[in-house]
Image (cartoon, helix red, strand yellow):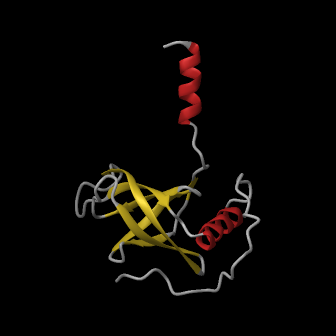
Amino acid sequence: MSQNLLRQHDQDERRRHPRYDVKGLHGVLNGTHPFTVARISLGGLMIRLQIEPNFNEVARIEVGLDRVVFRSRARVVYAGPDMASPSYGDTFYRVGLAFVDTPPDQQLRLERFIVREFPNSRSKPSERQATSDTPVDPPSRR
């Protein structure tokens, strides 16, 4: 492969949004499947759950971010067994989700969370008109 092609490949592989490891964040996929969040970014999540969703499936997600809930649709871009799961008991899967058509108020909610939790992040809250982040109930299990 030529140097120019290698350089282009490296640029294409760069992440659009930085990712952050998290602990203690929980959510619900399609209102019924609870999950834990392993990584978060402005573009998506890496989650751990007990079902293996179909690749390219678009799902509804809700994630508790402190006292507010982030809601969006997300496309499954990766799904595979969680090799860190114990070999006994329930099977877990690691699932990569890319946000799809996130409403502006929800995007702002996510940006604020990332800036607050990761102060050295490159993310900055949008200049859009802020909406109230009124505390709400945790994600539902419909």
In x, y percent, where is residue 135? 61, 86
Between 29 and 104, the one nearer to me in the picture = 104
Q: Quadrant of residue 34?
A: bottom left
Residue at the outermost right position: 127
Tell me: 103 left or right of 89: right
Q: Quadrant of residue 111?
A: bottom right
In x, y percent, where is residue 29? 38, 70
Please report the residue visible at 49 percent of the width from the left and 69 percent of the height from the top.
72
In x, y percent, where is residue 126? 72, 63
Residue at the outermost top position: 2
Please report the residue visible at 54 percent of the width from the left and 20 percent of the height from the top.
6
Please report the residue visible at 52 percent of the width from the left and 64 percent of the height from the top.
23
Q: Quadrant of residue 104?
A: bottom right
Please report the residue visible at 62 percent of the width from the left and 73 percent of the height from the top.
105
Between 19 and 92, the one nearer to me in the picture = 19
In x, y percent, where is residue 69? 54, 77
Relative to 36, say whether 20 is above or below.
Answer: above
Between 48 and 9, the one nearer to me in the picture = 9
